[in-house]
Image (cartoon, grey):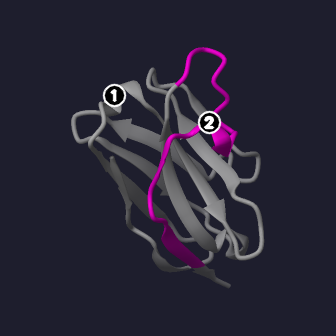
Amino acid sequence: VQLQASGGGLVQAGGSLRLPCAASGLTFSTYHMGWFRQAPGKEREFVAAIRSGGSRYYADSVKGRFTVSRDNAKNTVYLQMSSLKPEDTTVYYCAAGRGGSSWYPQSNKLYHYWGQGTLVTVSS
């Protein structure tokens, strides 16, 4: 299984970026997909998730600014980030997990596969 996140880069505060994460080696449509971020010396932080059925979840810090979506035909999950802030600067990771109705998307322990991360830098 491979998850390949991309799309990171340098953007000014208030700008936008879209991060795609392409998955291979798994039945993508049956997996819940999540985005996390991790700054140096800090714990991995939940950002957003989308269930296999399409339900979406967001951290309070990004609600209204970020949108998670998926294209099952392309085996790709996206994180559209708008109104970016300097505090959004860090490495972003995509992840895939499976579970039933009790599956908790905010827990990084419930994801089976992780991508390598892509760096987002927001300048003030």
Find residue 44 and report its horizontal and vertical position in percent.
Answer: 69, 58
Q: Nearer the viewer, mark 1 or mark 2?
A: 2
The spot of residue 91 in percent (x, y) is 57, 70
Q: Position of residue 112 (x, y in %)?
A: 51, 40
> At 26% across and 42% down in the image, what residue appears?
25
Classify residue 82 by image quadrant.
bottom right
Q: Earlier in the sequence, mark 1 or mark 2?
A: 1
Task: Report how far apart the C-alphas of labels 1 and 2 lie in the structure.
Answer: 17 Å
Residue placed under numbered mark 2 in the picture = 110
In this rendering, the answer to whether 70 lies above or below 85 is: above
- Furthest toward the left, the residue is 73
Asked if the residues shown at circle 1 and circle 2 are in contact, with their CB atoms under 8 angstroms apart, the answer is no
Please report the residue visible at 63 percent of the width from the left and 61 percent of the height from the top.
37
Q: Looking at the rendering, in which quadrant would you find the C terminus?
A: bottom right
The span picked out in magenta is 99-121
Amino acid identity at mark 1: Ser
The x and y percentages for residue 115 are 44, 57
Residue at 63 percent of width and 24 percent of height: 103
The kind of residue on which mark 2 rests is Leu
For mark 1, what is the residue? 29
| The quarter of the displayed image where residue 6 is located | bottom left
67 left or right of 40 in image: left
For label 2, the crowd category at 10 Å Cα-Cα, with few meaning under 14, some 14 to 19 and many 20 or more, is some
